[in-house]
Amino acid sequence: MKTLGIETSCDETAIAIYDSNKGIIGESIHSQMDMHAEYGGVVPELASRDHCLKIIDVLKGALGEHSLNSIDQIAYTSGPGLLGALLIGESFAQGLSSALEVPLIPINHLEGHLMSPMMEFPEISMPFICFLVSGGHSMIVDVKEKGSYEILGQSQDDAVGEAFDKVGKLLGLPYPGGPHIEKLASKGNSEAYNFPRPMIHSNNLDMSLSGLKTAVLYTVQKIEDLNEAIKADIAASFQKAVTDLLIAKITKAIEQTNHSDVILAGGVAANKYIREEFKKLEGILNIKVYYPDLKYCGDNAAMIAFVGSMTNPPKDQNIKSNVRARWPLDELKK
Ligand code: KG4
Ligand code: ZN
């Protein structure tokens, strides 16, 4: 069974083919990151237009030698995300499904992030905990079984990736700031600034990041000569504060659930310092920590094709729009 997955929820146009016997057999991605960088963030209208321009080439890239006629079903991201961008992927998916006369399966983007590590690490078994840290979401999810997800805690304000990007802006780094902060932090002293770790001691698994970002803002405002060495110290201290917060919350989540498999997913999971600190928990808490390959941390279509392969197509295959800008994970039906 071959599932073609389509992802256009934000600024990546991505298509992949998942074969139930062989795994991913084709994938292609076009990132719009450089286009949005000049505006310091994703411009929704530009994103939609670019998806439209690139999606045919991305499909050709994913197919490679494979024939379109060999595809058994089409899965696509129908939310959450930018509405215009989602509509491009949905229309394209609907066109393909109708032309090929194959089933169409709308997929929740967050479910893609949660479940895709199972594609890379078949030894992972449910239930497990997934810490999803991206530009739009920061949540600890109890993945009980396919389709049954309980959000144990989440950011009350900025997402972790968003905080990285905002601090990147304060330090004059290009968008998105996350990878640049990581690079700069490797040259800095993480003890140089004692930034707050908001809600680190709260009894629940919720987090707050905006106070930390504001603390960095006030620090930067007081510095007259914001040279490279100081920027590196700020980046390292900020990265450490975020990591301490994430480690405290995931530790609490493990104690609360007793689950022994932990998955770090989403764009921020590409951060090597955070990965290493999470990995250390294996020895301390007697758990296994997994994180996706770097190319599957950020948005990709492999995760959509994979979840599509595990999802029954809706009985109602009438062409109608399923896209939604907001789609809480705990409202998913089995
Ligand atoms: O999952 P993703 O590609 O897109 C969504 O938000 O859905 O995540 C993008 C976020 C951005 O905020 C980016 O700065 C952050 O992930 N990011 C990182 C790193 N690489 C990407 N944050 C910290 N360290 C990194 N190495
Ligand atoms: Zn994402």
Image (cartoon, rainbow, N blue to C red):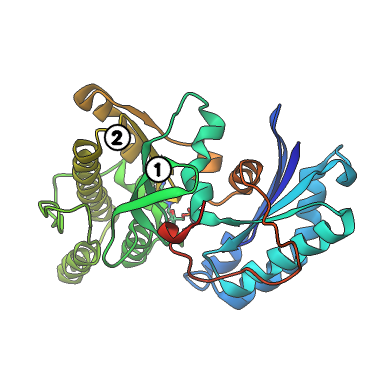
Regarding residue 179, the answer to whether it shows in the image is no
* Disc ID at residue 281: none
Mark 1 or mark 2, earlier in chain: 1
Q: Nearer the viewer, residue 283 or 328?
A: 328
Tell me if 83 is positioned left or right of 160 in this view: right
**Residue at 87%, 53% in the rendered image:** 100
Front: mark 1 or 2: 1
- Label 1 is placed on what type of residue? Val
**Relative to 245, is 42 above or below?**
below
Q: Indicate which disc residue 278 carries.
A: 2
- Crowding at dot 2, Cα within 10 Å, few <14 / some 14-19 / many 20+, comes out as many
Quarter of the view holding residue 275: top left
Residue at the image position 40 percent from the left and 43 percent from the top? 143
Residue 323, position as x, y percentages in the image: 61, 69
The residue lying at 71 percent from left, 72 percent from top is 320
- CA–CA distance between discs 1 and 2? 18 Å
Q: Element at badge 2?
A: helix
Hey, which residue is sitting farthest bottom in the picture? 45
Quadrant containing the N terminus is top right
Type of amino acid under label 2: Phe
Residue at 11% x, 55% y is: 202
Q: Report the residue marked by disc 1.
A: 143
Picture coordinates of residue 248, whole percent (x, y): 18, 43
